[in-house]
Amino acid sequence: MKRRDFLAGGIAGVAGLGGRAAHLQADAPSRHVFGRGSAGAAGRADLVVRGGTILDGTGAPPRAGDVAVSGDRITAVGQVTTTGTVEVDARGMAVAPGFIDIHSHADLSLLVNPRAESRVRQGVTLEVVGQDGSSIGPWSDGAFEATRDRYRRNFDVEIDFRDIAGFLDRIDRERPAVSVASMVGHGTVRSYVIGGADRPATPAEIDRMRGLVREALAGGAVGLSTGLEYTPGSFADRAELVALAEELRGTGYPYASHMRNEDDRLLAALEEALHVGRVARVPVQVSHLKAQGERNHWKAEAALAAIEAARSGGVDVHFDRYPYVAYATGLSNLFPASLRAGGTESFLARLADPVDGLVLEQACRDKIALLGSWDAVQITRIGGSNAFARGRRLGELATELGEDPYDLTVRLLREAGGSVGMIGFGMSEDNTARILSHPLAMVCSDGGAYAPYGPLSNSSPHPRGYGSFPRLLGHYARDRGSMPLEVAVHKISGLPASKLGLADRGVLKEGGVADIVVFDPGIVADSATFEAPHQYPEGIPHVIVSGVHTIRDGEQTGQMGGRAVRGSGAGR
């Protein structure tokens, strides 16, 4: 769908959206950090978003109206006669709840740069971190010390916590630009109890892990995540996963699974995730649903059918997906998890072993065959003398350097101590649109927080860290017509809020937290590309986080209202 056609109907028909930039009118000094309070229709509000088209987050049709805010709460939605100390002219704009990233990796980076530039500028107001089996604690002494030393050395940031409760307390002290909730990572818990060993957990170890999950829930966690393609999570059997997921029973929080496989064994891996939810009797969130490799693209429809059948059979299942055809992971994930057991040093030693090395090489080349070519792999994160490889495709780089692509892959891993990031191009555009538009789909970034300046600019990340939500609204909802705009907004606000039981977020309503995004539906678009990812999106002039006007006329004000969002089990 062309932008002018999009503006001619639908949302534009409600309020005459014209695509011009909104502007701010203020009659008071503009340090917009408001205390919590309330104002009725006859009183004075701290802020009024005036004359926009409201997409309230429920998926309901758009309607014209205003939104009033006092303190950190919405005090009125509709025709607001209240005058605002600050008035935002939203004529020609859509007004939506703040976007909730149901699958985010913006955790410790928020301490490196609390402005969270790549996140809040795309309308994200709440990050749900602790994904893919990896959370901020619980950490052993060794894991805590390694993390503390790395952040001191690389970022001059002091890590003074070692579990989710401590991390959330730090978020409350730091008050970054976005709010934060966290799941507890199965892989983190397993590493704490068992380490990196490839073996089943003993009954005693399962009891210890269950206790750590309980502690995390008491510390404010909002679910349990797995990363079953990664070590050590990949070494868990179904019984272990069910046992830990049972700790969620009665909380309403989901078992969120990066499944064991997303290509040749996708359907079996999906059945395992559904099985865990079914047996443990807990909700399921399938992480970043995809079918990798052209030979597996047909499985996308089969996966959706399996999810629908499970839903009909009583499993409270949803899934999420980022709006791109490429994924991001570590370069070591070109190799089987079973041969990465024992940690990075053991893996690098196997690469050099005459016998194991041949097995690893064949597995890696098979993975490349699945993706199509070595140019389907792009390096994103690497330091030292190999920093020149950032943003480069492996095949092209190998040709330029006169090396075999596999030999180059191994060399980069060895010289970087195993710490190399990659993007893999393996999904189809049609499947991506189909998955995103499915009624059970939420939309996530699966990305971190970055900025085009400072230490968070020292990589060539997946563009999803900058562009996921504007890409959904622009490329998929407007340009492709994959879904109505109000449905797109629901997938990134009301639906994830409901999945996590966040009754006061995700919907524009009186009494709700004042997380608000004002965007231009005719312009909104992602600007970040795979070749040049550090670019802010277009068409999002205003973002308000907990009543704090953080993005104003498209610029970061430096005023930040983020806070920790704790689960209902916190403090129990």
Image: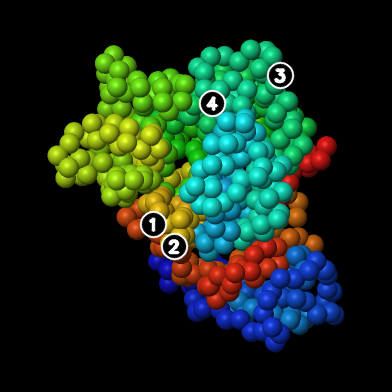
Quickly name the residue at label 3.
207
Q: Which residue is mark 2?
A: 453
Residue ID at (61%, 26%) = 192
Q: Nearer the viewer, mark 3 or mark 2?
A: 2
| Residue at the image position 76 percent from the left and 51 percent from the top | 503
Q: Position of residue 355 (x, y in %)?
A: 29, 14
Specify how the rendered protein is coloured: rainbow
Count of labels in the image: 4
> What residue is disc 1 on?
533
Between disc 3 and disc 2, whose residue precedes? 3
| Residue drawn at x 26%, y 41% as measured from the top left | 394
Q: Are marks 1 and 2 in contact (CB under 8 Å)?
A: no
**Given the image, on which type of amino acid does mark 1 rest?**
Pro
Marks 4 and 3, how far apart in space?
A: 17 Å
Say if residue 442 shows up in the picture.
no
Chain-order first, disc 1 or disc 2: 2
Alpha carbon distance from label 3 to label 2: 45 Å
